[in-house]
Each structure stands twice: as C-alpha cells, then as structure tokens.
Amino acid sequence: MLSEWHLPPDYIVNNWTDELLNLMINKLVERKQRLSPVTQGEDSGKVSDETLFACASNLIKVKKNGN
C-alpha cells in the first residue's frame, strides 16, 4: 500500500489524518477493483479488447479533429 503512494510510513503517520487515510485506502481499493479484470485476465495474460476498453473508458480521452 505504501509503495502505491511512494511515501514512507512515518510521513503518513505524522501528516495524514485518519479521515485522509481512510479516503486514500477506499480510493485504492476502488482502483484495484476497476483494474482487476485486466490484471486477472485469461491464463495467457491476454485481455480482450472489450475488457480493456471497458476498464480504461474513464482514462482515455479522444480529441476530435476540427475537420
């Protein structure tokens, strides 16, 4: 968990409130659940296009060309 935030434990203990820690843990869990279909895909390590795009839909932004 600490490696996810790139912070040493003493920084979190000394600078984060309990509320912030709970929020960060909840957001981490949400992100891990969103990514789980991709990371726990087929045995071959491949993921279908549909699964990939479904998991990344909120991460990919497409700009339309002005033409």
Image (tube, rainbow, N blue to C red):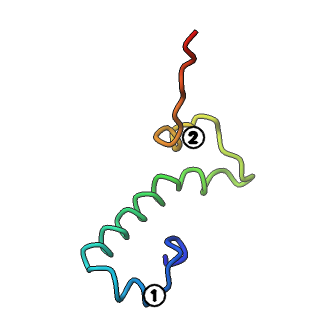
Q: Which mark is residue 50?
A: none
* Amino acid type, residue under disc 2 in the picture: Thr
Residue furthest to the front in view is: 66
Q: Is residue 16 above or below residue 46?
A: below
Crowding around mark 1 (Cα neighbors within 10 Å: few <14, some 14 to 19, many 20+) is few
Report x, y in % for residue 13: 36, 88
Q: Nearer the viewer, residue 15 or 39?
A: 15
* Amino acid type, residue under disc 1 in the picture: Pro
Q: Nearer the viewer, residue 31 or 11?
A: 11
Q: Is residue 67 above or below residue 52?
A: above
Q: Which mark is residue 9?
A: 1
Q: Residue at x 58, y 34 (%)?
A: 50
Q: Is residue 12 above or below residue 29?
A: below
Q: In the figure, is residue 29 to the left or right of 54?
A: left
Residue furthest to the top in view is: 67
Report x, y in % for residue 11: 42, 85
Q: Residue at x 53, y 42 (%)?
A: 56
* 2 and 1 marks in contact (CB < 8 Å): no
Question: Is disc 1 placed on a helix, strand or loop?
Answer: helix
Report x, y in % for residue 30: 40, 58
Q: Residue at x 33, y 75 (%)?
A: 21
Residue ID for mark 2: 51
Question: Is disc 2 placed on a helix, strand or loop?
Answer: helix
Q: Residue at x 50, y 79 (%)?
A: 7
Report x, y in % for residue 62: 54, 29
Q: Is residue 4 above or below residue 40?
A: below
Q: Where, by quadrant of the figure, is residue 33 drawn?
A: bottom left
